[in-house]
Image (spheres, grey):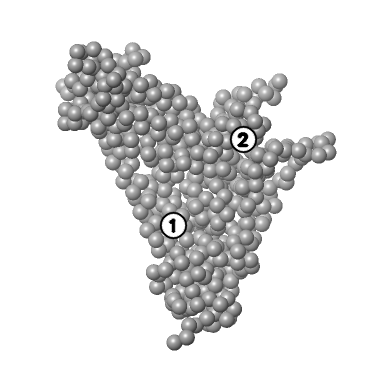
Amino acid sequence: MPEKIDIYSGATLDSKIDLSIQRGSKNSEVKMEKYTVEYDKTEVVLDLVHRVQAEFAPDLAVRWNCKAGKCGSCSAEVNGSPKLMCMTKMSDYTNAKSMEIRPMRTFPLIKDLVTDVSWNFEKNKQIKPFKPPTGVKELTMYQQHVDRIQEYRKCIECFLCQDTCHVLRTHEEFNQYAGPRFMIRLATLEFHPEDQEDRIGEIKNTFGVNMCNITKCCQEVCPEEIHITDNGIIPLKERVADNFYDPLMMAVSWIKRLL
Amino acid sequence: MIELEVVNNFENQRRDNWWFAPALMASYLIIFGIYTFWVILFLPRDQAFLHWNTSASGTNYLSPFYSPDIEVFGIKPPTINIFGFLWAVSPAIFVIWGPVGFRATCYYGRKVYYRSFFMSPPACAVDGLKTRKGKYHGEEWSVFKVVHFHRYFFYLAVILVIFHWIETFQAFQFRNSGGGLSYGIGLGTLLSLTDAILLTLYTMTCHSFRNLLGGTNTPGSFRYWLWNKISKINKYHGNFFWYSIVTILVVDVYFRFVAWGTIVDPRWLF
């Protein structure tokens, strides 16, 4: 019997899996629909979702763009774990007979696998932009300082960290906490050696850094492998402790202000 | 009227064994906690102080639970009469709060107990125990604010680690067959040395120490160099947390077996 080949990718479709995808929108019934899909072990989950779209459900809504883990569009929950569908290899599920794909639970559902992540963009607007020192024509900084910030700038805004963060996901504290993604953005600005903006008060009170109880799920799910908690949130918490809790550091900064 | 939304217990769609890691960590910490209570409340202190000139084994070992030896500072633990029962207060009670405080406020330790005991959350994308909306305060709540003083426990831990090293060097001393003092290496010495190394690594990879050093200092300066080095090994802070909490238990159990005479400490004297 001749091998079945995918006409677009050339993949050899020699395996089968029952793919359950959450279907429905905010105005209709939401349920899991099962599709039996043929696939190649070298494919990724997004390939299978596209095959479902091509062969069974042309009205299936899924947001995607680069299929290379760089645009941060295809965030979903594969077997309950927040992942980028384009970076989730089927070779990691070789013995699986079935798989479940759901949209990100933390954000409001639009349709099928597409959620409304606009809350994030509104939150982003609250962060004060970079404030350069006055009277300096050209900013110079050490490469090592650039390298430190560069890790945070790898963020592709897939919002998987926001989805998995239990402060937003379970406790729905959207007003109290900005979420890991914006802690990283704040760290980018706060750890810039030339930034003149005073952010620590806001980081504590407006963006709620101490709502985070450092269970490091954001770091576990980050597809860009940014050390969100270790290199971003914890150093910010330490700076908040310097300014609001540590009497010794508070005394030092008070004396510095006097001098 | 405020509507209180109840969140389902452990609601999740994960298909892997997400409960395994928190259950394993909780199990070990419960065993360690029970053992620690037993040690500091009931066990006679001379089992863990194997001074070369007093113990039958001729070793100079000190269990990490009793480190530093408070008698060095002239503190003598009292014996209290509780309704006719004489309770010799363990010297461990005087020192145990230091390491416990350091670990309880540790950034990695917090992850462990928030996941394993508070179930907040037990694992990623898994809801915690039944909670009510609006009741979560993170680390801005009541006594939990003590975690923001982790740096002070770090300062204390540095002092404790220095004492630990002094005691490790003392563990190279043995009573020889003539009754005098000899230097050598026993299995207990090696265990003590391993424990000291792991505790040093655990302490020096502390996030608070990293913050103390900075990160925006001038590259080329000693502070920046040290920050860079600490940052590289900081990612293993959690590993050192577990390795050192295991070696503490192993060392203490081994020293007790040596004290009871169950194990004859193998040693090589110079």
Q: Chain of mark 1?
A: B
Outermost residue toward the bottom in this view: A1
Sequence-wise, the earlier of marks 1 and 2 is 1
Reading the image, the residue beneath label 1 is B126
**In terms of image quadrants, where is residue B218?**
top right
Residue type at mark 2 is Gly
Q: Chain of mark 2?
A: B
**Mark 1 to mark 2: distance in Å?**
34 Å
Q: Is residue A100 above or below residue B96?
A: below
The crowding category of the residue bearing disc 1, from other C-alpha atoms within 10 Å (few below 14, some 14 to 19, many at least 20), is many
Q: Is residue A166 above or below residue A134?
A: below
Q: Position of residue A100 (x, y in %)?
A: 46, 69
Q: What SS does tag 1 mark? A: loop
> Is the residue at mark 1 from the same chain as the one at mark 2?
yes
Residue drawn 22% across the image and 17% down it: B176
Reading the image, the residue beneath label 2 is B215
Residue closer to the observer: B267 or A87: B267
Residue type at mark 1 is Val
Q: Position of residue B84 (x, y in %)?
A: 16, 22
Q: Position of residue A227 (x, y in %)?
A: 55, 47
Position of the C terminus of chain B by quadrant: top left
Residue drawn 44% across the image and 42% down it: B238
Residue drawn 41% across the image and 35% down it: B103
Kindly indicate whether the residue at mark 2 contacts the one at mark 1 (C-beta within 8 angstroms): no
